[in-house]
Image: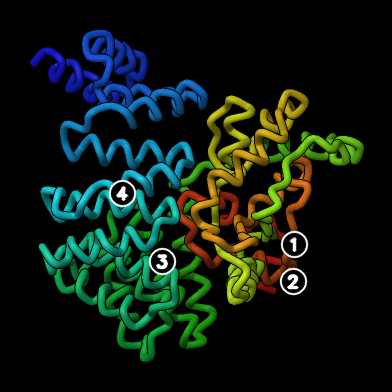
Amino acid sequence: MQLEAQLAQAHRRIEAGDRGGAAACYTEVLRRQPDSAEALLGLGGLHLEAGRHGHGRELILRALDAPMRSPREVLLLASGLHAIGESGLLRAVASQIPLSAWGSASQLVGFARSLAASGLHREADACLDDALRREPDLPTAHYLKAEQDIAFGRFESASQHIDRVLAVLPDDPGSHWLRSRLRLPEPEGRIPRLRALLARAGDTAARAWLGHALHNELHELAAYDEAWEALQLGASAQRQQVHYDLEASRALTAALLRVSAAELKAEDGYQDPHLRPIFIVGHYRSGTTLVERLLGGHPAIATAGESFGFPTVLRRESGLHFRGECHEHAVLTRDRHDYARMGRGYLELLRWQAGNKPFLTDKLPGNVHNLGAIARALPGALIVHVHRDPLAVGLSNFRTLFGQACPYSYDCASSPNITGGRPC
């Protein structure tokens, strides 16, 4: 009972913003019960949040050997493994837990969310299908199923799942936005509803979703002036929810420009004779997904989607847990990196996705910042750099609701191609 009280106290301290106090609670629990999965994962997460990747990763991996005393701990483990980029280990965990072991449909959806975020889409679909078998009208399951369907081009199925969400939650802004992405016929029938919802939207998240949804539907009608106004509303709301550190971006660019050609020629990486990665890079919305799908049609090429495999090994080597694909610190500490270990570690992380195929694509656009490290760690890697007209890329970025990714993309006021609030 005392341990449960300490864990509850840790949760309260986190909610109050007292990370140090929460860490002390978790540490006390581990002193008394070293195999407490919840304490290991909680303390590991706090280390990651503070940027201490090595300490956080060590604690999360220790939790793999701890007894799982509740479905909550399994969900925490799944979230932790996703945070440190261990999709293969998460896949192994999923294979060991029968669907019948989950106590509720909501727990299955929570597990599916971590699986999908780690690229384990087949396993996520199995969880969602079982959740919907148990609770056919569960909105969260239908919503995540629709996201999965859209990602894989199953648009008719996605539309059906969105309809099921809206039958239960008719005002759900995220579902209206998802539906707008399907480019369904007769958008004029949906636009009045979106306008009404947007007019009374009470929070920034709802305004961001509904503004982008209204933009998409008006754009389909070729009502471009109104579509542009809706887009500005949606982007303005989303801009309030993200943080773009311009100075950090400039510092990263400056650090990358100091990498010399001689460094990249050092023969200290790793080559696997049985698996050769293909990195597809470029700006977001430049066509990387299309290129990967074309390459993935070849029988010798497996696809890994937007894998964070290389950022994962970069975090391990630099010791810093950072958001996004790269960080100035990882570049500045490059002289201390073991590039052979990085290359080997990257391939081991993604080998499960390759199966028996000799080539594997990795289409994370932001790996463009990591090309120097990739070339050195994986000298046998192939690199496909996708180009598209800069104005088309910029406009497409501005029109896309990325969530927390691409935080720069919600403000085009400083663009020389935008005047008077309208495109030239």
- Residue annotated with mark 1: 385
The residue positioned 72% from the left and 66% from the top of the image is 386
- Residue annotated with mark 2: 389
Residue toward you, 9 or 173: 9
Closer to the N terminus: mark 3 or mark 2?
3
Secondary structure state at the residue bearing disc 2: loop
Secondary structure state at the residue bearing disc 4: helix
Query: 96 above or below 192?
Result: above
Closer to the N terminus: mark 4 or mark 1?
4
The residue positioned 73% from the left and 23% from the top of the image is 336
Residue toward you, 264 or 149: 264
Place of residue 399 in the rendered image (x, y in percent of width and height, measured from the top left): 54, 67
Residue 422 in view, yes or no: no
Asked which quadrant contains residue 362, the reply is bottom right
Secondary structure state at the residue bearing disc 3: helix
- Residue annotated with mark 3: 211
Secondary structure state at the residue bearing disc 1: strand
Residue 94, numbered circle: 4
Query: 17 above or below 242?
Result: above
Closer to the N terminus: mark 3 or mark 4?
4
Q: Few, some or many C-alpha atoms within 10 Å of disc 3 (few <14, some 14-19, many ≥20)?
A: many
Q: Amino acid at mark 3?
A: Gly
Q: Amino acid at mark 2?
A: Asp
- Are dots 2 and 4 in contact, CB under 8 Å? no
- What is the quadrant of the N terminus in the image? top left
255 sits left or right of 216 in the view: right
Residue toward you, 169 or 275: 275
